[in-house]
Image (cartoon, rainbow, N blue to C red):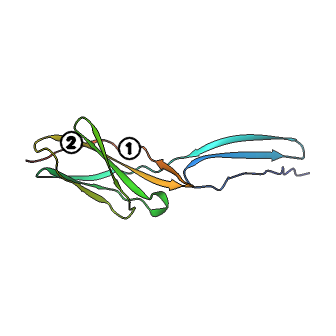
């Protein structure tokens, strides 16, 4: 005799970022149920290139597909962090102007998406540095 327990999954096919709960119910040889939760995290992006300019720099990053992101955030700093938001998933670069010449800036990029009214961010990319001319 072949035994195939009946299982019920809640939110098992969800692919959007967030935390989900799975419930399983088994019947036949084993009666009972169990619950577990899992997280879906955002994909991380990478900085491809940093170009320096006079009191500015341009950062280029690897674009992700539309289903993985709605936009990007760029963090740059000398000492205090400043964040610029690019609200399009199509763009792959940003020029930051009006900076101090001769200073080294540290740059990072991350993706974000809004899902069911909640904003989810990926982790920041590896830190890269650029020295502005000026």
Residue 93: image x %, image y %?
28, 59
Q: Residue furthest right?
A: 1
Residue 64: image x %, image y %?
41, 59
Mark seen at residue 38:
none
Judge left or right: residue 35 versus residue 117. Answer: right
Judge left or right: residue 88 versus residue 9. Answer: left
Q: Residue furthest top?
A: 79
Callout 2: SS: strand
Callout 1: SS: loop
Mark 2 and mark 1 residues within 8 Å of each other at the beta carbon:
no
Q: Answer with mark 2 or mark 1, whichever residue precedes in sequence.
A: 2
The residue closer to the viewer here, 27 or 77, is 77
Determine the residue positioned at 46% across, 51% down: 43
Judge left or right: residue 102 versus residue 24. Answer: left
Determine the residue positioned at 88% across, 52% down: 2
Q: In this view, does 25 lie above or below 93?
A: above
| Distance of label 2 from label 1 (alpha carbons) | 16 Å
The residue closer to the viewer here, 40 or 118, is 118
Residue on which the image places disc 2: 105
Residue 58, image quadrant: bottom left
Residue 66: image x %, image y %?
45, 63
The residue closer to the viewer here, 35 or 28, is 35
Judge left or right: residue 5 versus residue 81. Answer: right
Q: Residues within 10 Å of mark 2 (few under 14, many from 20)?
A: some
Q: Which residue lies furthest to the left in this view?
A: 134
Residue 127: image x %, image y %?
30, 41
Q: How crowded is mark 1: few (under 14 residues within 10 Å), some or many (20 or more)?
A: some
Count of number-bearing discs: 2
Mark seen at residue 124:
1
């Amino acid at each position: 005799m072949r035994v195939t327990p009946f299982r019920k999954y809640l939110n098992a096919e969800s692919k959007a970022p967030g935390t989900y709960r799975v419930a399983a119910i088994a019947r036949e040889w084993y009666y009972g149920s169990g619950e577990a939760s899992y997280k879906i995290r955002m994909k991380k992006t990478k900085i491809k290139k940093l170009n320096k300019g006079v009191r500015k720099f341009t950062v280029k990053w690897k674009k992700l597909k539309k289903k993985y992101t709605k936009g990007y955030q760029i963090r740059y700093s000398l000492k205090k962090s400043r964040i610029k938001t690019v609200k399009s998933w199509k763009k792959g670069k940003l020029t930051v102007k009006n900076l101090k010449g001769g200073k080294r800036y540290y740059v990072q990029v991350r993706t974000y998406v809004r899902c069911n009214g909640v904003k989810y961010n990926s982790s920041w990319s590896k830190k890269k540095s650029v020295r502005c001319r000026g």
